[in-house]
């Protein structure tokens, strides 16, 4: 329980935040939910329910050294303000490291990322693949991202990718098409929605993901399959706990990767905390 001496300043602060959010709400675009969902699918690869203010998440692998953490903040219209993501996985003699930092910039966003693959051989680590880049996301007059560019280097060699995005009449993202000098980035993604309007699936040339919901619209999990020249990977994510908005705050995941000479299984758990702009009024 908060002691009385602290209650008045806290209430004044909360009242100020609520007033700020209410004032901003009046300036938000009428279709802000759909606009934010479409933009978040492009930049964050997912959506969530409610007027979100902050998301903090952490993932830990159970079978190997695998960790991820992310922090995502949103403005009073629940549009992305900043995102920071770090990922690390060591399996056998190979380590994969990824980081990404996205910030609002003018009418769009800028994102810097770093991906490194390191091999440990006889106690000596060698960087065998390194990709660094900066992406820019450009917003059109309706508020959704219409195109993006990605300037990068792979092992010191420069490259470039551009992408364009297509929407339905309600501003829901339907398709993204990426073309450039990195063959692994060249792809077409198709996005679909169920009869209740929930984002239900995403498929590309070599992968597909299906998202599951309960009868009340709460997140239930996802199922995905991806194929590479070396393996086929199946991922299952099961939500074990939801918050009062229906967003998943605790999930368990399992992988099954089929290689030419082996089958690898992996397991992980993910915990997520959501904060909402209108949370103080509940």
Image: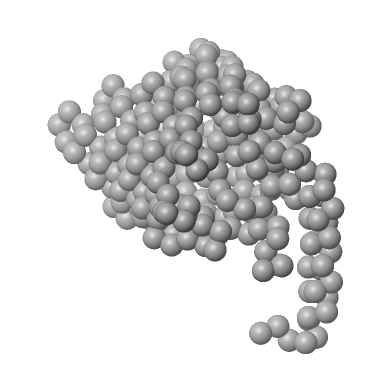
Q: Nearer the viewer, residue 146 or 44?
A: 146
* Image position of 58 with respect to 100: above or below: below
Residue 17 drawn at (x, y percent): 80, 61
Image quarter of residue 6: bottom right
Side of 194 relative to 228 (left or right)? right
Name the colour scheme. Answer: one colour
Side of 136 relative to 16 (left or right)? left
**Residue at image x 70%, y 57%?**
277
Q: Nearer the viewer, residue 156 or 72?
A: 72
**Residue at image x 47%, y 60%?**
242
Image quarter of residue 128: top left
Image quarter of residue 27: top right
Q: Quadrant of the N terminus?
A: bottom right
**Residue at image x 63%, y 30%?**
171
Q: Quadrant of the C terminus?
A: bottom right
Q: Residue furthest front?
A: 195
Residue 91 drawn at (x, y percent): 31, 42
Q: Is residue 41 visible?
A: yes
* Image position of 192 with respect to 196: above or below: above
Side of 267 relative to 41 (left or right)? left
Q: Is residue 100 visible?
A: no
Residue 89 drawn at (x, y percent): 39, 44
Q: Nearer the viewer, residue 254 or 102?
A: 254
Numbered label tally: 0
Residue 54 drawn at (x, y percent): 64, 54
**Residue at image x 52%, y 14%?**
179
Side of 119 relative to 168 (left or right)? left
Q: Nearer the viewer, residue 179 or 114?
A: 179
Q: Residue furthest bottom?
A: 4
């Amino acid at each position: 329980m908060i002691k009385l001496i602290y209650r008045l300043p806290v209430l004044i602060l909360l009242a100020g935040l609520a007033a700020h959010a209410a004032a901003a709400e009046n300036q938000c675009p009428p279709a802000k939910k759909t606009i934010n969902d479409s933009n978040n699918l492009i930049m964050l690869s997912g959506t969530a329910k409610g007027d979100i203010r902050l998301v903090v998440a952490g993932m830990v692998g159970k079978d190997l050294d695998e960790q991820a953490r992310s922090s995502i903040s949103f403005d009073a219209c629940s549009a992305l303000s900043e995102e920071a993501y770090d990922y690390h996985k060591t399996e056998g003699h190979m380590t994969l490291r990824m980081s990404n930092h996205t910030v609002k910039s003018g009418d769009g966003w800028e994102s810097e990322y770093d991906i490194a693959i390191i091999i440990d051989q006889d106690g000596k680590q060698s960087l065998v693949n390194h990709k660094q880049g900066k992406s820019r996301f450009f917003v059109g007059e309706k508020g959704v991202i219409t195109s993006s560019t990605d300037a990068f280097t792979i092992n010191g060699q420069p490259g470039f990718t551009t992408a364009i995005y297509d929407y339905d009449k309600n501003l829901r993202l339907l398709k993204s098409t990426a073309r450039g000098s990195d063959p692994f980035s060249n792809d077409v993604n198709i996005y679909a929605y169920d009869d209740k309007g929930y984002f239900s699936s995403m498929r590309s040339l070599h992968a597909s993901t299906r998202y599951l919901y309960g009868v009340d619209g709460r997140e239930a999990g996802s199922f995905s399959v991806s194929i590479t020249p070396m393996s086929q990977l199946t991922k299952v994510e099961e939500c074990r706990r939801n918050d009062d908005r229906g967003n998943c705050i605790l999930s368990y995941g399992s992988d099954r990767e089929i290689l030419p000479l082996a089958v690898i299984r992996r397991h992980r758990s993910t915990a997520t905390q959501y904060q909402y702009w209108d949370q103080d009024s509940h």
